Image: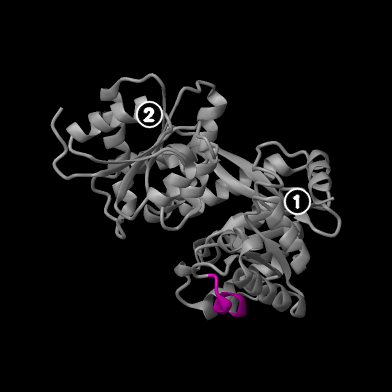
Amino acid sequence: MKNVIQKKSILIVDDDVSVTQMLRMLLETRGYVVNVAASGEDAFNSVSASTDLILLDLVLPDNEGFDICRKFKENRKTHHIPIIILSGRMLSEDIIEGLYLGADDYLIKPFEYEELIARMEVVMRRGSLFGSADTSSLEGNQGIIIELRKIIDEKLIIPFFQPIFDIKSSCVYGLEMLTRCKTQTILANPELLFKAAINFGFYQDLELLAWEKTLSVASGKLTEEILFLNCNPYLVEGPKFLSIKTLFDNSPINPKRVVLEITERSYISDFKMFFEHLRRYRGFGFRFAVDDVGGGYAGLESIVEIRPELVKIDRHIISELDKDPLKQSIVKFIIAFCKENNIISIAEGIETKAELETVIALGIDAAQGYYLCKPTSEINIKEMNEVAKRLMG
């Protein structure tokens, strides 16, 4: 195998010295620049804008590898970096969870080093397709297009659900649907799946398929709970309203029990025109939420123009909220604004007891996050309520 011409930076996250020494020697002889982190904390401190790939072990002294993978993929500065999990765990459940959390590949130890090098190059080559601002050209991307068509035609979508809990009752207020895909390709990563679908003109069909699968699974399992569906502005502005109306006309779930979470506000070019489209959906019964308030494009302009019935506070503001007075001031402002305007406020991404206690003390209406309940393909409202009552007390 030829040495890599352009030096690429690899971060190895593993506390096994013998493994990291061997990998470092192997990769450096191939022309890679190698950095090593022996813990999750070291990994977060070592990753940089120049990191091209992360090799991640699942067993670390301070963090579960799955949590590290998820945090890298949720962080705006690192979500684009490909991750290959290297693990001795052979259970299919571990492999599936790793891929669902955003890992780009999963290699079981012990492995052949030549296979690792090959997988690294494939993953980084795939990642480069999405790292560019312009991926509209079909040249070289036929494989992605074929896979997208296969996913839609064969309906290879699995809806996962994460509960949102009402603070006052400690019960499930609603379930947010998260799209997962049965594929062994890079499109197993939900973010890349939808980015590719938008780039190649498959987004509306893919989203409708996800909604169809969700309604099929959720029907009969929800009583008064609200169903939250992610919704890119492309769908609202597109020609699919009648298809959506037919979908819900044939479902026992009333649109009045559905909240559409507006994501990717960067795609809204004309807010006045977009608001006119929202009227049609509201007339059918849907309510709207602005997602990730306080982060990215989810600013006051989005709230003013969309006039949502709910807002979801960005997880990056909620993270370590208990330790940061400035973040607490921001959350206080958002909550006060919501109460004054009869908007339901939801805290996203709660991962610790301290974060939960802080948002409760600040007066938040509802909360969701891994601390309360991880996303699941099974809907069991009774079990979810029992867990929430125990944690929220």
> Which residue in the protein does label 1 denote?
253
Instruction: Reply above or below: 275 against 81.
Output: below
* Residue 19 appears left or right of 181: left
Q: Residues within 10 Å of mark 2 (few under 14, many from 20)?
A: few
Q: Quadrant of the N terminus?
A: top left
Q: Which residues are magenta?
A: 298-304
Could you tell me how many numbered marks the image carries?
A: 2
- Asked if residue 384 can be seen in this view, the reply is yes
Of residues 154 and 332, the one drawn nearer to the viewer in this rendering: 332
Q: Estimate the x, y position of residue 199 in percent, counting from the top left.
A: 37, 55
Q: Report if residue 300 lies within the magenta region.
A: yes
Instruction: Reply above or below: 281 against 273.
Output: above
Mark 1 in CB contact with mark 2 (< 8 angstroms):
no
Q: In the displayed image of the protein, which residue is found farthest to the front?
A: 17
* Residue 331 appears left or right of 47: right
Residue occupying the point 32% across, 48% down: 51
- Asked if residue 156 can be seen in this view, the reply is no
Q: Estimate the x, y position of residue 4 in percent, counting from the top left.
A: 16, 38
> Which residue in the protein does label 2 denote?
17
Q: Estimate the x, y position of residue 290 in percent, counting from the top left.
A: 61, 67
Instruction: Reply above or below: 284 against 149.
Output: below
Instruction: Reply above or below: 16 against 314.
Output: above
* Label 2 secondary element: helix
**Magenta segment main secondary structure:** helix
Q: Earlier in the sequence, mark 1 or mark 2?
A: 2
* Residue 162 appears left or right of 3: right
Residue occupying the point 77% across, 68% down: 363
Amino acid type shown at disc 2 = Val
Q: How is this picture coloured?
A: one colour
Of residues 124 and 77, the one drawn nearer to the viewer in this rendering: 77
Question: Which callout, 1 or 2, points to the residue nearer the camera?
Answer: 2
